[in-house]
Image: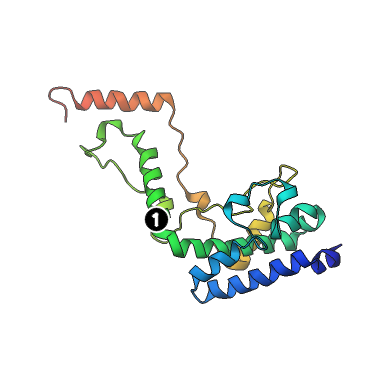
Amino acid sequence: MMARVEKDPVTVTARRLFHQAGKLDNVGDYDQAKPIFEDPAAFGPPSTWDSPKEKATGWRKVLLENPDYAEEDDIEQETFILQHHYKHSLQELAGPYYKQLVVLSDALGQSTLWPANMPFGFRMPWYTPSIQLHRRLHAQVQGPFDRLNAKGERFIDAENEAAARSTLGLYDFRALQMRMTVTPEMKEQMMQKKRGMGAPGGN
């Protein structure tokens, strides 16, 4: 089965394109790497990533039409690595813009915790960047295989993602990211604090 899929012209073409794009990404030619990654015979443009199996092209077509092949550990890990190189090119091309969007999202999320201090920052800072905005971290970019397959399962399971991250020498910062649910009780406490700060003689 593996040999049959590997010899398929669709697989061969996708691998050739990934090799070309990966070399360009490695030497910093991100503007040339991106369109090759997004060639219909490779990952395809983002607008096609949610298309049905019948209209899938490139590497997505290979994985959807050969589920046993797609579920091989080596293939899942390779898919993660290929996608990582694509995301790296995107980050290098549009990283500052993506980071601005993350900052905005992070700030809006925190603003629900501190209604008394928005927008002027009285008494305490209105906005303190959380861990995902560390200067060395990238904004999270969605790739073609950060979705579910035809079975409704992840294209890349957690164990193979971890193995691929280890191969690439990547640390998964997602476990450190702020995940705080604002409950009605927390909001009420903030409102009480706001009222207390506005009272005569309040500190």
Relative placement, left or right, of 201 versus 193 is left
Residue at x 63% of width, y 64% of height: 82
Q: How is the image coloured?
A: rainbow
Where 163 sits versus 198, above or below? below
Quadrant housing residue 114: top left
Give the position of the C terminus as an image quadrant: top left
Q: Residue 17's spot in the image, x, y percent?
A: 65, 70
Q: Residue 107's spot in the image, x, y percent?
A: 35, 43
Q: Which residue is mark 1?
A: 97
Count of marks overlaid on the render: 1
Question: Which amino acid does the dot numbered 1 rest on?
Answer: Tyr
* Label 1: element kind: helix
Front residue of this view, candidates 134 and 42: 42
Q: Is residue 78 visible?
A: yes
Q: Residue 8's spot in the image, x, y percent?
A: 81, 66
Give the position of the N terminus as an image quadrant: bottom right
Relative placement, left or right, of 137 versus 49 is left
Q: Is residue 134 visible?
A: no
* Label 1 CA crowd tier, 10 Å (few <14, some 14–19, many 20+): few
Residue at x 66% of width, y 63% of height: 42
Q: Residue 99's spot in the image, x, y percent?
A: 40, 54
Residue at x 13% of width, y 22% of height: 200
Quadrant housing residue 110: top left
Residue at x 37% of width, y 26% of height: 187
Where 194 sits versus 175, above or below? above
Front residue of this view, candidates 128 and 64: 64
Relative placement, left or right, of 39 versus 136 is right
Front residue of this view, candidates 10 and 186: 10
